[in-house]
């Protein structure tokens, strides 16, 4: 089965799928056990670009409460030239104060020593429970051990090592045909809860062997994050640890110039890759059984963004999606909540292409067809706002199930 | 048992509880069946002040999508002199367009005729499913029938007739000792889902036989709503139908002058009444088993309000409350989400008086004492923000349970 399984993502014609554990030329990765996870599962990951002169780009959570590794990346890292990523799962190293910063710095130093690069070229990331001290020595030993296990096809263990409540690993490897030759584009992501439409990812690491300037990497990552990890909701909760990194080893020798056809084609591939990964995060949303897409058209940009997020984050809309209930009144309610002071608002709603509300008023529809439209694994919702605006927005969201409650009400997950 | 059952509400010393179905002098009420509810339960309510010259005040939802009865109240009603309230449950008459407005106007006319007052003195309200046509003729017949059943102790049937997913009726009757004599203060409310900290009530009707100017009624209602229905969250979803009305018949002959001791004492009684009713809405939140109170201190007013709402609306915090899980990392996460761009933020968190986080950093605590603190029916959370600000805010919120999902994922509730 193709990695591009969602009907909302098109596989670009110039992209070929490789075995998902593959890494681009010049990269090696590994996952190992240091003992943070009570399950004894892989909980330390190391990713290394062996090529000097790598370019990179990064995006982080906008939360006012940022985990120690995020602060260390921002303050102690050459974000345009990263060559190593050191990660642990099972502990977010957030709200851990000075000791947490020390642990993150220790991870950075251990990975730098193991990979033989300067510490400022090493990004660190953590994911797991918030507010518990992280033993930097334990993770550092894990990183040193991981360094001896680095493999060119180690993407699988690396992806496994960054999982927390994820039900499945999220990774892909693509070969991209560019005018100058073939490059690889690979990514490993994790995320299932604490996901809201603001870099909702927790962690995602992208590698390519294309020769990129750091400014090109930054541009491509920004544009594609805005269409992927910025557009998904599991529970509308912004994380303290969100980190998305793009590392380019340049090992393919294929140069992607700014504003070139090659840049456009690499961007298309990255866009499809991150959108599908973002959809996998939603599909794997804690307890999720279905995925909805809310599309908003019309009005001005701020309005469509607010409405899209209000619908995608609504527990009532999510619960209705869970039950296959075409209760569009809850969409109308979310629209109204997002746009106070606009009543009476003349909006249209369609579900799976079936009109249920026109100019703010219920219209008759085929109940059987509507029930079928909300019964699938992927359900489309459309809201059109009145007025002269032509802005558009979209969000993807999971349903709210009994399992979400079970997962999140059990003692400290 | 006292109506004032929450530890967060103090019963004022000058207030005596009456049988809850009691109404103030000059009021009569009834509930009847018109057939909207499939259950065959009471679904039409009528409340009448028999005294000419009543004063009144109103508050409505701020949603951009407003139900027809809300629009009719705002545009066709003397909101300072209402004498009659006509309500139906089982259908919200929202997103129903021109036909919905006609149905609401027909309700207003029918109640006016039955009570013998001008239509502009009649408030209308609806609650139930959104986006389904309401048969105004059916409700009007119900109102005509209710008019023949009006009773001075009809508060019970009236409260019953406004229920939807409420597990229990919410009503109280108080006798308030004022310097000028005794007055009664009574209220009937409904609400369980679609509750967010913005006039989160769905419906609440308050009656008194004090002699009030409309401006005094408006002042008292505004101040007390801000401390009650504006401060509760079940699911963070603003309704299309929220309506809070205060009607003063003046039948006691006891005048409450502006800025008098009497006004203060009546205000204290109304404050306690509405706060306890708001807490009953949270306690009866769909699927709820516990109630949390988040208090925020420090920082400026906008910051404390945003943080209080972010914590109260967080499904992760709600699920942790459900499971009796002292996972305060989710509170830290919600604080950070509410205050982007402030990292590293030096906040403190206490649960049930036990410090778990100081200056943004985990501190050690007695796990057994903390587990006991989150095991009760009412759980206290405190966040102190850094800086020179002295603002305070609070919100009350229900937990997120399997039953919430069940209630809201079943076919169109």
Image: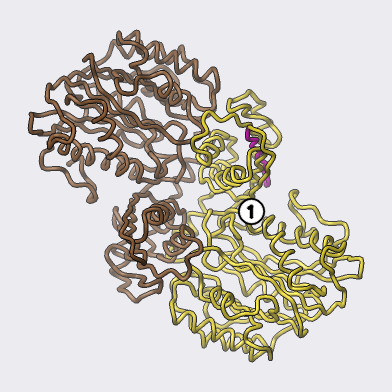
Chain colours: A brown, B yellow
> Depth check: A367 or A217 in front?
A217
Q: Which residue is mark 1?
A: B231
User: Does the stretch in magenta take in B379?
Assistant: yes
Q: Residue at the spot x=22%, y=47% of the render?
A: A9
Image coordinates of residue A81 in percent, x first then y, are 29, 20
User: Does the stretch in magenta take in A179?
Assistant: no
Image coordinates of residue B148 in percent, x first then y, are 68, 89
Image coordinates of residue B223 in percent, x first then y, are 71, 59
Whether residue A30 can be seen here: no
Tell me: residue A113, above or below residue B413: above
Tell me: residue B145, above or below residue A138: below
Magenta segment, prevailing SS (helix, strand or loop): strand
Q: Residue at the spot x=55%, y=38% of the render?
A: B335
> Depth check: A413 or A187 in front?
A187
Q: Quadrant of residue B41?
A: bottom right
Q: Is residue A131 left or right of residue A350?
A: right
Q: Which residues are magenta?
A: B377-386
Number of dots carrying numbers: 1
Q: Is residue B349 left or right of residue A207?
A: right
Local crowd size for mark 1, using a 10 Å CA cut-off: few (<14), some (14–19), many (≥20): many
Q: Chain of mark 1?
A: B
Tell me: residue B367, above or below residue A385: above
């Amino acid at each position: 089965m193709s990695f591009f399984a969602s009907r909302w993502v098109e596989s670009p014609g110039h992209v070929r799928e490789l075995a998902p554990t593959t890494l681009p030329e010049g990269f090696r990765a590994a996952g190992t056990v240091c003992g943070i996870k009570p399950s004894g599962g892989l909980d330390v990951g190391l990713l290394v670009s062996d090529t000097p002169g790598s370019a990179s780009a990064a995006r982080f959570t906008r939360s006012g409460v940022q985990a120690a590794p995020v602060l260390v990346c921002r303050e102690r890292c050459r974000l345009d030239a990263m060559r190593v990523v050191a990660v642990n799962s099972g502990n977010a190293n957030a709200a851990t104060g000075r000791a947490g910063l020390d642990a993150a710095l220790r991870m950075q130093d251990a990975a730098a020593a193991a990979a033989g690069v300067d510490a400022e070229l090493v990004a660190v990331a953590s994911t797991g429970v918030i507010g518990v001290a992280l033993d930097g020595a334990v993770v550092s030993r894990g990183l040193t051990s991981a360094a001896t296990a680095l493999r060119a096809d180690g993407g699988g263990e690396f992806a496994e090592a960054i999982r927390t409540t994820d039900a499945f690993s999220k990774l892909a490897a693509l070969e991209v045909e560019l005018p100058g030759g073939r490059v690889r584009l690979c990514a490993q992501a994790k995320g299932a809860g604490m996901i809201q439409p603001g870099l909702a990812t927790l962690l995602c690491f992208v590698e390519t062997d294309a020769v990129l300037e750091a400014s090109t990497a930054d541009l491509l990552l920004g544009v594609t994050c805005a269409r992927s990890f910025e557009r998904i909701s599991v529970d509308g909760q912004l994380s303290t640890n969100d980190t998305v990194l793009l590392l380019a080893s340049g090992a393919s020798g294929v140069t992607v110039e700014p504003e070139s056809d090659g840049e456009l084609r690499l961007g298309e591939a990255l866009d499809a890759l991150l959108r599908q990964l973002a959809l996998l995060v939603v599909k794997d949303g804690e307890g999720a059984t279905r995925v909805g897409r809310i599309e908003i058209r019309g009005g001005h940009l701020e309005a469509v963004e607010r409405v899209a997020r209000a619908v995608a984050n609504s527990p009532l809309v999510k619960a209705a999606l869970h039950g296959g209930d075409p209760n569009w009144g809850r969409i109308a309610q979310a629209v109204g909540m997002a746009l106070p002071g606009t009543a009476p608002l003349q909006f249209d709603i369609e579900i799976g292409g079936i009109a249920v509300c026109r100019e703010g008023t219920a219209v008759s529809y085929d109940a059987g067809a509507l029930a079928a439209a909300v019964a699938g694994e992927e359900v489309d919702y459309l809201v059109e706002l009145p007025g002269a605006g032509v802005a558009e927005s979209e969000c993807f969201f999971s349903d709210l199930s009994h399992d979400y409650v079970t997962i999140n009400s059990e003692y400290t997950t």
